[in-house]
Every structure is written in C-alpha cells, then in structure tokens.
Amino acid sequence: MGATAAAVGWNWLLPAHLVFVAMTTVLIVTDLDEKLLPNRILYPGTSAVVVLLAAGALVEGALTPFRNGLIAGAVYFGILLVLGLINPKGMGFGDVKMAFVIGLVLGFWDWRVLAQALILTGLIGGIPALFLMAVKKVSKEYPIPYGPAMILGAWIALFLGA
C-alpha cells in the first residue's frame, strides 16, 4: 500500500490503484500456478477499478485523464485481441482481457507510461521466453504465462511514471 500511495499520492485516485495492485497480485500467483487469468478475478476487479477510478477522477477533476485511460485500455485490448486472433495458442484471452485494465490505469497517467509498460513487458516476458525456447527448455506448444510479465511491466511503469 505504501509504495502505491507513494507513486499515486494520497488522493481519491488511490483506492482504484490499490484495487488494481491487489487484483494483479492475485492474478500473478494464479497465472503462474494455473496458467490462467480467471474471469472470476478479472471481471469484478476490472469493474471495481473502473468505478473507483471514475469516482476518483470526478472528485479530483481529472475526467480528461480518465477518458484517456479508457481509450488506452481499449487500444491495448484491441492490439492484444488482434494478436490473439492471429495466433490463438500464443496469447491467452485472459491476457487480452487484462490488457484493458492495465491500459486504463496506465493510460490515465499518460500514454508514455503505457508505452514504458509495453517495453518492460517485452523485456520481462519476451527475452526469457525466447532464451528458454532457444535452449530447448520449452517449446512453442508449452504455455508460458505472460500475465506476470504484463503485470510487472505495468507496476514498474506505474511507479516510475505516475
């Protein structure tokens, strides 16, 4: 909580970010354990973040950043949806759905924060996956959970850029 408050500030936006961090913490553990980002966590968590961020933005007079976050969430969701449709075995739909809430929270602060998260996600998740495939420890058919890399990239970008 302290790190999130330090990044976001003690204001009406903090509750949305605390729910975001709590939800994504559970999703990291679940994805690593079950290789799944379950709807029973994604849907209520995303709904709570949207409502709390909207309320916080209203109180703080930050409706334009909230609108920008909604757009960023839709864009990130759309990009991963296209990637998932092109290669269904390469991208799980849980990752696609989670992209909306990540895009919302990071896009609220700035598109650059979301861009940082995408770069960090690639470094955190992509490079180790390519290495493991290169040394034949895993194959394309072995599901590598990408949700934790997406979340860690988002957290780092949020804490650096919010």
Image (spheres, rainbow, N blue to C red):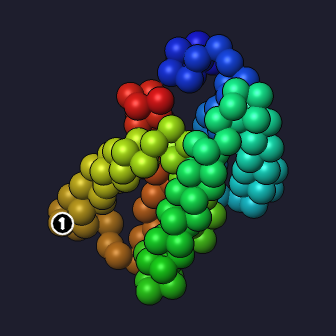
Residue 115 drawn above or below residue 63: below
Residue 143 drawn above or below residue 149: below
Residue drawn 51% across the image and 84% down it: 85
Residue drawn 61% across the image and 45% down it: 64
- Where is residue 122 drawn, in percent x and y? 31, 55
Residue 111 or residue 147, whichever sits in front? 111
As drawn, which residue projects farthest toward the left? Answer: 134
Residue drawn 42% across the image and 48% down it: 111
Residue drawn 75% across the image and 60% down it: 39
- Where is residue 92 drawn, in percent x and y? 55, 70
| Amino acid marked by disc 1 | Ala
Residue 22 drawn above or below residue 9: below
Query: From this viewpoint, is residue 95 visible?
Result: no
Residue 154 or residue 109, whichever sits in front? 109
Residue for badge 1: 134
Residue 83 or residue 57, whichever sits in front? 57
Residue 17 drawn above or below residue 10: below
Total of numbered circles in the picture? 1
As drawn, which residue projects farthest toward the bottom? Answer: 86
- Where is residue 44 drawn, in percent x and y? 81, 50
Asked whether, in this view, residue 23 is left or right of residue 69, the answer is right
Which quarter of the figure is the N terminus placed in?
A: top right
Query: From this viewpoint, is residue 90 visible?
Result: yes
Q: Residues within 10 Å of mark 1 (few under 14, many from 20)?
A: few
Q: Quadrant of residue 140?
A: bottom left
- Where is residue 94 drawn, in percent x and y? 62, 64
SS of the residue at dot 1? helix
